[in-house]
Amino acid sequence: MAIIRIRQISCKVNPIRSAAYPTPAKRPAFSVMDKARVKEQFGVKIAHWRDALERCLHENQGL
């Protein structure tokens, strides 16, 4: 949905449950990557995913 909003694309998205899209790997119901240790250990600044996505889409508009 974020790409649709950022690029202002008009299309219909039909959501499905994870169980309706079988994959070989078992997926947790909810998982979030904790970046705190990487940031602390290496002293890096990691952009919020939405900011990084916007930057990526704007830098690659021709794709």
Image (cartoon, rainbow, N blue to C red):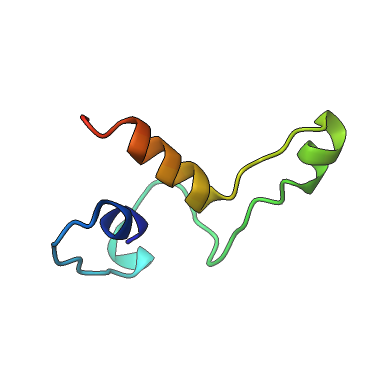
> Which residue is painted at 56% across and 65% down in the image?
30
**Relative vertical location of residue 55 with respect to residue 49 in this rendering, above or below:** above
Where residue 2 sits in the image (x, y, percent)? 36, 58
Give residue 14's quadrant in the image. Answer: bottom left
Where residue 63 sits in the image (x, y, percent)? 22, 30
Please name whichever residue, 41 or 62, is drawn nearer the observer in this view of the structure.
62
Where residue 15 sits in the image (x, y, percent)? 27, 69
Please name whichever residue, 22 or 38, is drawn nearer the observer in this view of the structure.
38
Please name whichever residue, 8 or 22, is drawn nearer the observer in this view of the structure.
8
In the picture, which quadrant includes the N terminus? bottom left
> Which residue is painted at 18% across and 56% down in the image?
9
Q: Is residue 6 left or right of residue 38?
A: left
**Relative vertical location of residue 47 with respect to residue 44 in this rendering, above or below:** below
Question: How many marks are shown on the rendered structure?
Answer: 0
Q: Is residue 2 left or right of residue 46?
A: left
Give residue 43's quadrant in the image. Answer: top right
> Which residue is painted at 78% across and 47% down in the image?
36
> Which residue is painted at 41% across and 46% down in the image?
54
**Relative vertical location of residue 14 with respect to residue 44 in this rendering, above or below:** below
Where residue 56 sits in the image (x, y, percent)? 40, 36
